Amino acid sequence: MGELVFMINGVDFRKYVTESGLKIMRNDIESQDAGEMMDGTIRRDRIMMRRRIELTIKDGLSTEDISTIFRAVWPQFVFVQFLDPLEGEVITREFYISTVPSTVMTERAGKVMWAGFSFNMIETGVPYNA
């Protein structure tokens, strides 16, 4: 069906993501006419769909690893290649990352290690065609 692929701007992130740290979701964007009507019914008027990906990065990474991750997600927009559950195949889409939280730095046996790092990515959008 498809192989496990997860790359951001050409960097393979599979080795950095925790075992259950890759979550792919769909966000629907509704028109201003959507919502709850006066009679209590709900009106949907989806105009766009966006994938949202939540990543949780492994603890204990080196400074070199963290630098590689930060450089990959530094640009305003990034290209992400991944196995999409909707399409059932590997696709490439453009995403943006609005917030990359800081990490926690510790020292173990004289070596600097990083932990507590996660972020969300939001697809730039796919117009909805019913």
Image: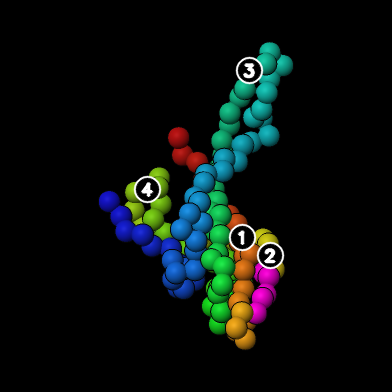
Q: Are marks 2 and 1 in contact (CB under 8 Å)?
A: yes
Q: Spatial distance from mark 3 to mark 4, Cα to Cα?
A: 31 Å
Q: Residue furthest top?
A: 39
Q: Spatial distance from mark 3 to mark 1, Cα to Cα?
A: 35 Å
Q: Which mark is residue 93?
A: none
Quarter of the picture holding the C terminus: top left
State which mark lies toward you, 2 or 3.
2
Q: How many marks?
A: 4
List x then y, in percent, for residue 119: 61, 60
Mark 1 sits on what residue? 119
For the residue labelled by badge 4, is the local secondary structure a helix, a strand or a loop?
loop
* 2 or 1: tag closer to the N-terminus: 2
The residue type indicated by label 4 comes to: Glu
State which mark lies toward you, 3 or 1.
1
The residue type indicated by label 2 comes to: Pro
Q: Is residue 74 magenta?
A: no
Q: Residue furthest left?
A: 1
Q: Spatial distance from mark 4 to mark 1, Cα to Cα?
A: 23 Å
Residue at (66% x, 27% y) in the render: 35
* 3 or 4: tag closer to the N-terminus: 3
Residue at (61% x, 37% y) in the render: 30
Q: Spatial distance from mark 2 to mark 4, Cα to Cα?
A: 30 Å
In the image, taking residue 4 as reference, residue 127 lies left or right, namely right
For the residue labelled by badge 2, is the local secondary structure a helix, a strand or a loop?
loop
In the image, taking residue 93 as reference, residue 66 lies left or right, namely right
Residue 62, quarter of picture: bottom right
The residue type indicated by label 1 comes to: Phe
Mark 4 sits on what residue? 87
Q: Spatial distance from mark 2 to mark 1, Cα to Cα?
A: 7 Å
Mark 2 sits on what residue? 101
Q: How is the image coloured?
A: rainbow
